[in-house]
Image (tube, rainbow, N blue to C red):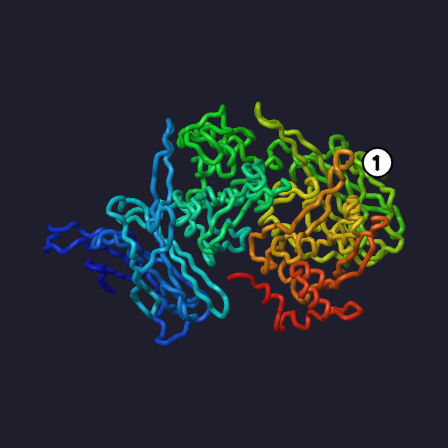
Amino acid sequence: MVTAWKGKGSWHLTIACGAIALTVVAAGCGDDNGSSAPAPTATKSATAQPTTAPTPAGAKAGAGLSSTITNALVATQPAGQVIVTFTLTDAAGIPLTPVLSSAQNDQQGRVRFTIAHVESYMGGGDLATTFTRYVNDINVTHPAYDSKGKLETVDAATGVYHYTFAAVLPAAGYDPTRTYSVGLQVDRTYQGTQLSANPVFDFVPVGGTPAIREGVTTAQCNSCHNPLIAHGNRREVRLCTLCHAEAAVDPKDTTIDFRNMIHKIHRGKDLPSIVNGQPGAQYAIFSSFSNSATVFAEKNADGTVTGVGFPRAIEACVVCHADGATASYHLEKPSTAACASCHDDVNPSKQTTAAGGPGTNHFQGLGYEEGECRGCHKVANDPAREFDITVTGAHVVPERSTQLKGINVDIVGITNHAAGQIPTISFKISEGHPPDTTPLTSLTGFDRLGFTITGPTTDYTVMLALTAAGGGATGTITPPGDDGVFQYTPKTGIPANATGTWVVGAELRRAVQLTVPPDTPAKSVEEAAVNPVVTFTVDDSTAVVRRVVVEDQRCAACHGEFSKDFSIHGNLRNQTEYCVLCHNPNQSDQARRKLDSAAVARGDSTTSIDFKVMIHKIHRGENLETQPYLIYGFGVAPPAGTGYSINNFGEVRFPGDLRDCQTCHAPDTYLLPPFPGTALGTRTAHLDPATGNEVQDGRLGPITSVCTACHDGEDAKAHAATQTAPDGAEACAVCHEEGRAFAVSELHAGRN
């Protein structure tokens, strides 16, 4: 097949043979020998054109959106004109019509294009490091999409089109040996759902392999952002980087260079310039879309700092920089723009920055040329080089230090576990990382060993928190014999009215002082064991395992591994099946809240710490209608402190789509049915102003407990109340059961 089309003064010839297409640019017309003009030069071997059968005339596009840039070229006449070939169809390959303004119906897709080139430059200094950067060819400092370009139809039956940029690559500065990257944003609304495609095409005008700049992939972002989406409907990191280039600034002249902006946003409320700044200090970016500033970190008048909180150890660069064509640059090419974005109180350069003059808070107060950073900040291939100034050593997460030997606790049995009896728990401890472990016969060096007994598994209502070793220890520990088994007998017994299946879990921790290089601040960590949970019965009934609703690996997608990448309660607790032993429907923050005399005098309502309510509310955070969301937690005991802390989770910013319950939940466990099963509703209560004791006010239904945790407005609460009978029976399933008009799965489908 041979097709020819003319674009403003030059003919473009496409020759397709089978699945191979090649696009060439003719520079002029010569004689048969081609003596008056050079031979045409291929821009790039193009992606194969669609080979599906042509769509019948009048066929209507259905669900989905698919778009690919199959080729791009730079014309010689007129010089610098960029022409792009792209496809636009629904999911089944039925063509859609591209439009340059808002789509008027679901058979159209709005298309917008931008273009940037990869530019190499020397960092200077003795090492002369070579860096690369994107430069946007529409507008260098205020990047944008091309406007007033031209659309042409190539093949209406298969949905192939051309777009000719209105913007022309400048004669001065255009280098056909560079990599140029064309980005396309396609938006389509189908049956009320907003769809998007963001293809990017890389090419070298004179031919050759493109040099792609990609320090992070969309897939990595989507492990938390679920999915990444910004500026209305932009979803691919590679498209973002074409505009968020090195010279780009917002309307207030704050840099929006991707590597600087993203580092600062994710460090958020831990940015040194904000933490150590004066009240009112902010990190904000002004958006021309909303005509307002988005504040990512701010120091308040009372000295607290609010803003983005990274959900795991910030030192773990590999969380974002594991994949991508240039992901290794964070190790191999350290620079001021990237490194001084997280460490924004340091200026290692020779130019004045927001941190101060050259060398501010840097080694010996000296500033260096950009290319010299890697002279000191090397890539350390030796994992033993921890906490030094190599890039890898400086970003070791302390809880992942190779100096930690690993500790383990295993519950091997429980006796005397009938209702009313005082049980004896048999356990082993060991050192090492499974399966290579060494048994230990002494608890010396461990600052806490604790057990939690609770039941029944239909839904936990009783919590026996037992300290076997460490502060406040009670009960008796029998040292191990030849079998290495310890015995622990607490002073508290299983309640006499206990029935059914119960569980016992354990926690073990020790403080470890890590070895650091000279002149480096000391580092100590709390090394913790994985929490084991063992089931037993108190009445010889058939054991019933508690429901599994949340899975640890889903938490890990954002938080990493608990006790290594994210700390809970002094780094002690790391398994959700262990968390719920304490965070049951009857528990609240009363034990800590009652230590606040003002809260007692007011007769404050206590805050439930029932897992199914608390976790929903924490993750809903800033989107809660009832603010603030306060939980009284542990604090430093008197006389050094109050014995409590007040934690406002109403400022938490969830990075994903809150409608997508399966981000955290095991499949189908959030639907009606099977929820609620045997789950209990959450208890509500307040403090007695006279005694500080908790006075129970009532109990919500189990479905109401969960749903009004996120949907916490007065209208939602009233709706739930009107659908609850006087005996507590909830009628939620009438509308929200699967297959009904407002099924949970439909209302929580999330983004496409």
Q: Amino acid at mark 1?
A: Thr
Helix, strand or loop at label 1? It is strand
Work out whether residue 664 or residue 47 is closer to the camera in this orientation and state it: 664
Work out whether residue 255 or residue 742 is closer to the camera in this orientation and state it: 255
Q: Height in image: 172 above or below 57?
A: above
Work out whether residue 372 or residue 32 is closer to the camera in this orientation and state it: 372
Q: Height in image: 252 above or below 523?
A: below
Work out whether residue 483 or residue 146 is closer to the camera in this orientation and state it: 146
Look at 69% across and 33% down and name the residue there: 511
Query: Is residue 470 in view?
Result: no
According to the picture, the residue beneath numbered tag 1 turns out to be 478
| Count of number-bearing discs | 1
- Quadrant of the image occupied by residue 458: bottom right
- Quadrant of the image occupied by residue 523: top right
Q: Position of residue 100 (x, y in %)?
A: 36, 63
Look at 26% across and 56% down and name the residue there: 23
Q: Position of residue 47 (x, y in %)?
A: 33, 57
Look at 71% across and 51% down and name the residue there: 577
Query: Is residue 624 in view?
Result: yes
Q: Quadrant of the N terminus?
A: bottom left
Q: Position of residue 689 (x, y in %)?
A: 83, 50
